[in-house]
Amino acid sequence: MRALNIVTGVAAPMMLANVDTDVITPMQRLVNLHNADLGKWAFEPLRFVSTPPLGQEDEGERVENPEFVLNQPTWRNAPILLAGPNFGCGSSRETAVWALDQMGFRVVIAASFGDIFEANCFQNGVLPIRLPNEQVEQFAALARQVPTEGQQFQVDLEQCMITAPDGDKQKFEVDSWQREALLSGRDAIEQTLTRAGAIKSWQAKDMEQRPWVWKAI
Amino acid sequence: MSTKTLFDKLWDSHVIEHLGGAQYLLHVDRHLLHDGSGPGALRDLGRRGLPVHNPELTFATPDHFASSAPGRDDNSTRHGARLIPKLRELCARNDITNFDLNDEGFGIVHVIGPESGLTLPGLMIVCGDSHTCTHGAFGALAFGIGSSEVMHVLATQTLVANRPQTMRIKLNGSLPKGCYSKDIALALIAKLGTGAGSGFAIEYAGDTISELSMESRLTLCNLTVELGAKTGVIAPDKTTLDWCASRLPGEHLAALSNACDELVSDADAVFDIEHEFDVFKLAPQITWGTSPEHSIDVARSTPDPADAPDAQTTKAWQEALEYQGLKQSSPIMGTPIDHVFIGSCTNSRLSDLRAAAAIARQGKVDKDVEAWVVPGSMAVLRAAEAEGLDEIFKAAGFQWRLPGCSRCVAMNGEIVAPGKRCISTSNRNFVGRQGPGARTHLASPATAAACALSGAIADPREYGVSE
């Protein structure tokens, strides 16, 4: 996994509540796309006013909705997403995180996240940060001021600190296990396989205590 | 003496190691794969040169890409033609039991788990599908995971997971006429909001629960993820053990029954949040908008966005009404519909089909409506056919189709056309869920059947139904 330490850049304010993973990567489109094209098609229902029919992704034009925040020149390459509460709710599809990653997002800040989406972020080197919605709204208001150099946000995972464009500092919390995983970019499976002995002895004991678990159908 | 909730007991009994903070290494007792989550993860695992850690605890079924058309095979859907054989091949190579397309054990993963006896109280169950929380109805610890986590479970039979806080929802009283556990869930989500459960595991308790059948409990727990919660659990009781009795070898049943005695929240257990909900006041529900929380009594009107609690919600309601092609502050009953879909891991079990058939037998599907019944599994299909439900549906003008996820997620191409309106017994009415521009209204099977006959959004109580 790619490591993450300090992320500096503009923050895109997309403060809609309950943005679901079906909106981030709609399923009927998703199944026709190569994984590498997920970012290009992300947020299709919000981002485009017209798109080619299903199955004809390579033909026809996608017409952008100029109103949509992520289509505005200021935010096109933003590495930080400021989102409304319950961002990434719904389906477990990890493509939602892959799509955000391909769009260049390394950090998503919201009051709450879909549980599986949040776990998927950590699997892909994207940092989800939970802060009270009022704080995220405050950041969004700052972000909407025309950004110039020096008006960037900085997210420092080592220090668990966000520095806003106005210099304000805001601490955030992230579990130490996940923080270390992101800082080091270590592989989750390799990490767990170092505990192979503990897994084996847990299973051996369990086979005696709960034999019905191990006699499935 | 520490006291524990049911969820605490389930969690603690699966901890291999506390990794610090809220992170735990948990043992997985059942890993369920499907044609969406399985092929890629098994392929990538092979590429890394890693074996499946416990193939005997891993089970698969190609439910997502299966066509529901009579006479279907692998090649009936564009992506199924590739993924269904791939899942078959990878399961064979890795000694994983695959409930293959058209086998008698085939069905939607969250339907066949319980019906085959794979789902049992006290088990830790994961699947690369957000509706895995369904299995919590048995007093199991069950939740959905992402595709990287699927590979982690395949490689290690464990999961690194974040321990949620606990919430209890007490449900009071009996279900009124025309109401089902689907209506409880939708009304709860409308009351609490789709984000209310974020960071929580929910226990459903109260006197309503003891009256609910196993299948009704599965529907309730299925929709827990639409409250934003990690999972929803119900303490196992006689109803649960009766279900397990016919599905578990006798020598294990007594031991399981003893283990179930512990699977209850201690009397003085403390929950981080408690809610109560009066089920006896419930009316049949239908969603009007594009989130499961956009649910109202079917006899009510759509909301006025000006009444929303804040400006952001006003905007969300306006957009939802516009997407759905509905007027604000207008009765939702009588809105013409194009499709009815009775199916999905939420509502495709035998009792669901019985409730819908009790209404279907009273008339004919409206001439402008295309109505589908997609049983949840081959076992449900056979049981329904044995009691003649298929004949009732067909005589009324419903299509009697073959099991699978079908039009709930429409990965198999069974989409609803742009602008068309579908009454669906599934779980999500998100923008584009059933196809780009499709308009979805979530409801119970009884309400869906009533709508099919009426050709418009209708109240199932007008068909004299009862639970």
Image: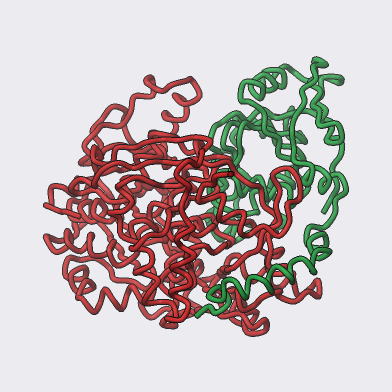
Place of residue B46 in the rendered image (x, y in percent of width and height, measured from the top left): 76, 75
The front one of B154 and A108 is: B154
Image quadrant in which the N terminus of chain B is located: top right
Is residue B192 visible in the rendered image? The answer is yes
Image quadrant in which the C terminus of chain B is located: bottom left
Colour seen for chain B: red
Place of residue A82 in the rendered image (x, y in percent of width and height, measured from the top left): 67, 30
In the depicted structure, whether residue B270 falls above or below residue B264: above
- Residue ID at (25%, 77%): B385
- Residue ID at (37%, 20%): B307
B245 displayed left or right of A45: left
The front one of B437 and B184 is: B184
Colour seen for chain A: green
The front one of B3 and B143 is: B3
Is residue B74 visible in the rendered image? The answer is no
Count of all numbered marks drawn on residues in the image = 0
